[in-house]
Each structure stands twice: as structure tokens, then as C-alpha cells.
Image (tube, rainbow, N blue to C red):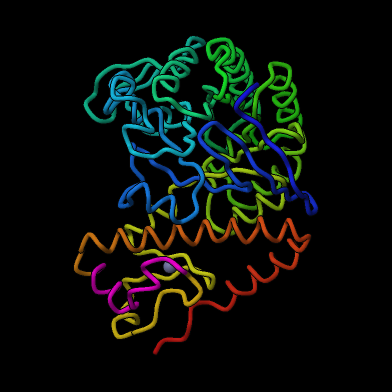
Amino acid sequence: MTGFSFSLSATDGKARTGAITTLRGTIRTPAFMPVGTAATVKAMLPESVAATGADILLGNTYHLMLRPGAERVDRLGGLHEFMNWSKPILTDSGGFQVMSLAGLRKLTEEGVAFKSHIDGSRHMLTPERSMEIQRLLGSDIVMCFDECPALPAEEKAVAESMRLSMRWAQRSRDAFGDRPGHALFGIQQGGVTRDLRAESAEALQEIGFDGYAVGGLAVGEGQEIMFDVLDFAPDMLPVDKPRYLMGVGKPDDIVGAVKRGIDMMDCVLPSRSGRTGQVFTRRGVVNIKNARHADDPRPLDEGCSCPACRGYSRAYLHHVFRAQEMISGMLLTWHNLQYYQDLMAGMREAIAAGTFCDWENQFHADRALGDIEPV
Ligand SMILES: [Zn+2]
């Protein structure tokens, strides 16, 4: 396929680094994708998101189809133009959020009928409609429409759900057609069961995709079980295609996933936490609302280059959070996204240098120290 390619430049153990090339720019992997749910990464200008080092954003089909509507975005020039972001965009299929957010929904072989959580209006998402919406949005990386059961679930239910998703994957592939410069990713399902994961991976490769996601994780199973699955699931996917772990996660989830061969991730955590006063630093999580920061003239993180750390004290960030000033969410979100992008850059460098194991040990050692001593 022209206009989309993936190349690995180094591996260290199972960890990989490389680049995805698209018509809208290069995505350095492993990559973290900030989430721009409603055509905005909340509290951030698009140029600020780019300044943190993000090469790609994620947009949510479910939210955008309901408001402002995919046809409207298309008339206004597509999602890139609409939200003023010129780099690549990956859109999810809407399947996961229909199941988690929509009211009254009905799942059939055809697709999912549901009521909007915003105004109760009735909608139908099918593989064909999901492909159409993602095309109207102008997404660079399109995800197959799938169904994802919450864990824990009975193995029989997981198997039936996975096989439905594989039939939908074929329908997604057929509906996507041939769109040079745009990629379609398949999604492996099968819960925590090795045989089901293998069956799913085989079914997807028979259809053929430009990249493969490990789906159905980070849905309540916990890190230990997730890592157990990641010990075998990515190995079932083609070596020469990008592997995307959907909806992950906390910094240590991300490091553990990269260690197990994952190339792409997304999560609302850094941006959402920025609005609730939870800050990610090299030395673990800091709650800026705690009184211990009220007189602290030091930055959040000495080693961080973001505007929140360069220009403001913990005391100021504590004050604006407590006063519910808008700049609080802006600065803390920027810092968190910077932390995540620095984390990815650190891993890319370490993999390239063949020192990922040392890097990982240092990552855990720094976090074990806990936050700096109070003033
Ligand atoms: Zn910072």
C-alpha cells in the first residue's frame, strides 16, 4: 500500500523502535497517542500537543458521530482541518464506547443499535457505518469495528464475541476498500485465553491489515493479567506491522507493554489527570492539591522542560488548582503529556542503544524513591 509504511530500526529483547510513515508525517515508535475525544485534547492547543513531542492523536468515532456529526466534519474539511491538527490522526471504531457509554443498546450480527448518551437520539453502528464515519473524519489510521466484552467473562462468551469481531473485521476490510495513504488496523480479541488469541490473530492475518491492535485488555483485569496476556499475544501478530495496545495506560503499564513488543498506545489518563490535580513525575504520582505544596517554591519536576515546570512553582500550581482557575488544567495537562512523551522518547533511545533493561531498572528505581521531601 502506498503512503503508509512501518519500519523497525532496532529491537532490544522484545522491545522495538522504529517509525510509521504516513502522508501526514512520521510517527516514532513506540508512540503514545494523546486522546482528542471531541476534536480537542482538553485544555491544550494543538500546537502545544505537538510541542510535547506527540506525532499522532486519537479521535473518538462515537463522540464525533454524535456531536458535531461525521458528515458535518466532512463538509468542514475533515477532522484535521476542523481541529487545526495537521499530523496523523487515528480514530477508534466507536465499538468500545458504544458499549461503555451509550444508553439502551442492542447487539446483533448486523451491528449495535443504541441511544445517544447526550440526547437520547437513536443510532446504529455497523462495520460499514464505522468505516464510513472514519472516512468522513479523514482519519489516517482507521480501526476495525469490533466488540469487546468486559473482563472477567465466561470463556464461551469471549469466544463468541471474538468470532463476531472477526466477521466484523472482514466486513470492515471490505467496506474500507482501497484508500492509498490510509491504513486499516485489525483488532485481536480473545480475552485472556491463548487459544482464542491465536485463533483471532490467524483470522485477522488471513484478511490482511496494515497494523494490528491487541484489543480487549485494560478493561478491568488488572496489570498482572494484562502482562500475562501480553507475554504471548503480540508474538502472534506479524513482526513487520505496527502493534497497538488500546486504552493503555499508567506509566508502568506502558513500560511493561513496550517491553513485551507493543509499538503504539493511547490513554486519557495524562490529560484527565491534569484536570483532577494528579501529576505524573519521574518519582511517581504527585497530588498537587495536597497542602504540603502550598509554600513549595520548587517546580513539579526539575528534569522536565514543560511550561508548568519552567515557569511555575508547586505553590502556584497548588494555588490555581485550589482556586479552580483554568490555567491549572492547562499547565498540569501540558506537564502530564510532556511526561508521557519524554517517557516514550527515553524508551526509544534506550531500545536503539540496546540498554532498555538498564533504562527500565532506573525507571522503577526513580519511582520507588517517591516524591521529593517537603520543604
Ligand atoms: Zn513539566
Quick check: can you spot residue 38?
no
Vertical side of 45 occupied by 346: above or below: below
Please tell me which residue is depicted at 43% across the width and 14% down the height of the picture. 129
Relative side of 100 to 317, left or right? right
Vertical side of 204 occupied by 236: above or below: below
Q: Is residue 306 magenta?
A: yes
Relative side of 300 to 253, left or right? left
Vertical side of 163 occupied by 297: above or below: below
Relative side of 182 to 193, left or right? left
Based on the displayed image, in which of its 4 quarters is residue 365 positioned?
A: bottom right
Based on the displayed image, in which of its 4 quarters is residue 333 positioned?
A: bottom left
Vertical side of 245 occupied by 66: above or below: above
Q: In which quarter of the image is the N terminus?
A: top right
Q: Quadrant of the C terminus?
A: bottom left
Quick check: can you spot residue 327?
yes
What is the x, y in percent for residue 208? Answer: 69, 19
Please tell me which residue is depicted at 41% across the width and 51% down the height of the picture. 49
What is the x, y in percent for residue 323? Answer: 19, 68
Q: In the image, which residues are magenta?
A: 305-321
Near-viewer residue (179 or 70): 179
Report the number of numbered marks. 0
Q: Main secondary structure of the magenta part?
A: helix
